Amino acid sequence: MVWLHVKKLVVVLIGALLNAVGLNLFLIPADVYSGGFTGVAQLLSRVLTEATPLTVSTGFLLFLLNIPVTILGWLKVGKSFTIYSFVSVATMSFFLELIPVIHISNDILLNAVFGGVISAIGVGITLKWGASTGGLDIIAMMLSRMKDKPVGTYFFALNSIITLTAGYLFGWEKALYTMVNLYASTRVIDAIHTRAQKLTALIVSKNAPDLKKAIQTELYRGITSIQAKGAFTNEDKEILMIVITRYELFDLERIIRQTDPQAFTNIVPTTGVIGFFRKD
């Protein structure tokens, strides 16, 4: 378990570094804005720098914005998830201060695409290992639980505000390139992890009793058991159906690998759940 946490921490650090590289070498020099709290920090940094005598870095503002969110996440979302998310934010803020802001290319389209792709790889691997990059992820999760609306609604709302603000203040061409960046990053995250907020796992196992016990002990999710028979082997098996959030996918995959490595698992996006689904 200690080795697992060490690997998870290393992945979070690599993800934070990639995020910082995408911002300081591509997006910030081209005045193209990222999504979520990172985009908010970029906008505030530029507005404060141009409108006031203050020069406040994106990294410092990103860290500052995430402090109250981390406190809320600790109370409402979960301690382990929040700790790793805060580590991600803190190290990303550190790397943003450490890495110089330089122009790799003067082509704004290349900057928007490559900045989005590199940052998205960082976000994707962080999510894949059961953490997040903080900020909007935590807020969207809490709002989704309170209002029972898809988390994607809140991502879309904030990213729309960032895009429109960037266009209004700094020119609509910047807003269009910001949209290109958001599209590229979304596609990469989809490929590495998933944008679906809820997922259904269908697990075909010959060791279902142990697997059920392990899942219920660690995830506290309800499981539907369906008797099945292998068409080729004619062996008796069970299909375990479980609905989880995307943040639980890493833990579910780990439990399956440890308990029944031979299990066949199909993970599919879930557009909605009717009936009881534990939200906390």
Image (cartoon, rainbow, N blue to C red):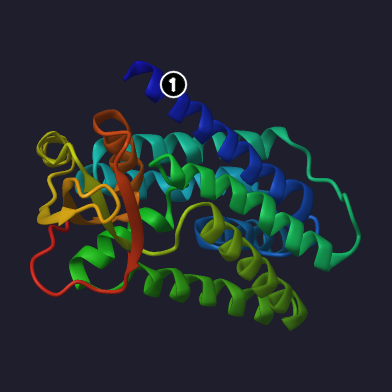
Q: Quadrant of residue 17?
A: top right
Residue 65, visible in the rendered structure: yes
Residue occupying image coordinates x 46% and y 25%? 7
Under mark 1, the amino acid is Val
The quarter of the image holding the N terminus is top left
Question: In the structure shown, which secondary structural element does the residue marked by tag 1 occupy?
Answer: helix
Which residue is situated farthest in the right direction here? Answer: 106
Say whether residue 54 is left or right of residue 104.
left
Say whether residue 152 is left or right of residue 242.
right
Residue 28, visible in the rendered structure: no
Q: Nearer the viewer, residue 81 or 226?
A: 226
Residue 192 locus on image (x, y percent): 54, 52
Residue 235 locus on image (x, y percent): 19, 45
Residue occupying image coordinates x 29% and y 29%? 258
Q: Nearer the viewer, residue 67 or 270?
A: 270
Residue occupying image coordinates x 72% and y 65%? 32
Residue 91 locus on image (x, y percent): 54, 33
In the picture shown, does residue 25 fall above or below 162? Answer: above
Which residue is situated farthest in the top direction here? Answer: 2
Residue 142 locus on image (x, y percent): 26, 59
Say whether residue 222 is left or right of residue 55.
left
Near mark 1 (Cα within 10 A), the count class, few <14, some 14-19 or many ≥20, is few
Residue occupying image coordinates x 68% and y 56%? 117
In the picture shown, does residue 78 fall above or below 241? Answer: above
Counting labels gives 1
Residue that mark 1 sits on: 6
Q: Nearer the viewer, residue 121 or 168?
A: 121
